[in-house]
Amino acid sequence: MGECELCGAVKVGVKRVQTGKTEVAACSRCVEKLGLGPKGEAPGLAKARRFSTAPAPRKKNNLMSRGEKELADDFHKRIAKARTNKKWNQQQLAKKMAETVNVVKAAESGKRPTDSVLRKFENILGISLMVERTASESRHINAGPSRGMTFGDYLNDLR
């Protein structure tokens, strides 16, 4: 027999229960009314434990991940030229694309737009902004006192 720390009842059976971060001695009536009994497992936690692995992240359709094509170096000039050929200003183009004028201005100034915006430019202006991938570096081999090209050099070139 003890004293309930919550309601002050004297000479009652008490048990130690958690209330927040504190442990108190509470009578059975307080435990029942305040719902201080032992907590079951949260439904979301039980569901999460059933899935031992996280689902794979959804892949977005990334135009730049296509191995055979890349964004043209002069994409901003192509956009501006196609827009002027259609006799549209930047506001008109933005409205037709359902984008802001700042998106069009940024793209025409050379800032790379997102893949979805690139597709919109291509569809609305009827142009292609993607070109065949080309090698970005070249290697010259000198005939001279240096060693020749090794098999390792060849493999590095393939990467």
Image (cartoon, grey):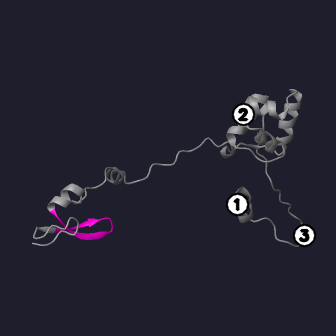
Q: Nearer the viewer, residue 148 or 47?
A: 47
Residue 87 in the image, given as x and y percentages of width and height: 88, 27
Query: Of tags 2 and 1, which is closer to the observer?
Result: 2
**In this figure, which residue is indicated by the disc labeled 1?**
155
Q: What residue lies at 85% left-to-right and 72% top-to-bottom?
A: 146
Residue at 31% x, 53% y is: 42
Residue at image location 73% in from the left, 32% down from the top: 97
Residue assigned mark 2 = 120
Q: What type is the residue that disc 2 sits on? A: Lys
For the residues bearing labels 3 and 1, Cβ distance under 8 angstroms:
no
Q: Is residue 127 visible?
A: no
Label 2 Cα neighbours within 10 Å, binned few <14 / some 14-19 / many ≥20: some
Q: Residue 18: say if magenta.
A: yes
Q: Secondary structure at mark 2?
A: helix
Q: Earlier in the sequence, mark 3 or mark 1?
A: 3
Q: Which mark is residue 60?
A: none
Residue 152 image-quadrant placement: bottom right
Q: Give how far across and how far down residue 37 sits, in percent.
A: 21, 59
Q: Say which of 85 and 73 sits in front.
A: 85
Residue type marked 1: Leu
Residue bounds of the magenta highlight: 15-27
Is disc 1 placed on a helix, strand or loop?
helix
Image position, residue 50 (x, y; %): 33, 51
Using the rendered view, name the quadrant where residue 138 is placed.
bottom right
- Look at the image and tell me whether residue 137 can be seen: yes
Task: Give the quadrant of the N terminus.
Answer: bottom left
Please tell me whether residue 64 belongs to the stretch shown in magenta.
no
Q: What residue would you read off at disc 3? A: 144
The residue drawn where x is 79% and y is 64% is 149
Q: Quadrant of residue 5?
A: bottom left
